Image (tube, rainbow, N blue to C red):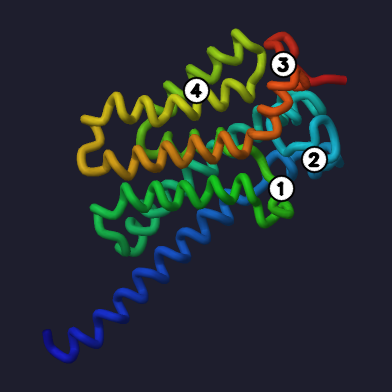
Amino acid sequence: MSRGEEGIQPKKLFMDFLQIFLCTLGAYLLGSIPSAIWIGKLFYGIDIREHGNGTATHNNMLQVIGSAPSIAARILDILKGLLAAKVALMVHNQYGIFASYEYPVLTLSFGLAAIMGHIFPIFAGFRGGKGYHCSLGVFLAFDPLAAAISVGIALLIYLFSHYPNLGHIAGGFALPIFVFCTRHLYGDMLIPVVVFSIVLFLLLFISHRDLMLNFLHGNEVKLFPKLLRRQS
């Protein structure tokens, strides 16, 4: 290797690290946009965390404010995860930064950063949502079928139990199982995707721990389909 090449290599490594760091930070900041909190404050003049069960969740929004803002927040959170996971592709298309083989891993990395931002948002005192819908957006970016299966299971559990948070946990648990059962579709990315889906489920389980304790102690509120409307 020539002296010129030796001098360029560390600079290239630093630039690669800087680019990935900035994109990861951007994904985290995107995930940190507290949809439920800002909708509550901007349109209803309340901090959703000071009402109902004290969480910045869509279900708490549904009970305190109504179905329309709850649905809007869900859609925005899915879009956050989807856009964050697509950061690698968008940046590469614009600037030609990342190699094609880096896309899958960076998609998972940026998606995870957005989920962490959603659960621990810097714009809301690190008190955010539970992460399920943002996680759906991330999976939607690289495996729409897995996202659809997760939603189907979550809805099924909710319709039978009337506990939406139980549905979210079940939907999250379905992701690593589905990935493993369809492992032939992932090729060399199988291990990263399996690890990512397991980490994702653990994050969901941890973020829902208080709600799950309420469920185990019989204190969790049931939500019935007929109640999915704005409450007066």
| Residue lying at 74% horizontally and 21% vertically, measured from the top left | 217
Amino acid under label 3? Leu
Residue 101 pos. (x, y %): 24, 53
Q: Could you classify mark 1 by the number of other residues whose Cα lies within 10 Å: few (under 14), some (14-19), or many (20 or more)?
A: some
Q: Please report whichever mark, 3 or 2, sits nearer to the chain's N-terminal start.
A: 2
- Give the farthest residue toward the bottom: 3
Q: Could you classify mark 2 by the number of other residues whose Cα lies within 10 Å: few (under 14), some (14-19), or many (20 or more)?
A: some
Give the number of the mark in front: 4 or 1.
1
Relative to 121, residue 154 above or below? above
Report the Cα–Cα distance between label 1 and label 2.
9 Å
Residue 223's disc is 3
Q: Please report whichever mark, 1 or 2, sits nearer to the chain's N-terminal start.
A: 2
Q: Which residue is mark 2?
A: 49
Q: On the rendered structure, is 69 left or right of 153?
A: right
Q: Which residue is mark 4?
A: 151
Report the Cα–Cα distance between label 4 and label 2.
25 Å
| Residue lying at 17% horizontally and 91% vertically, measured from the top left | 3
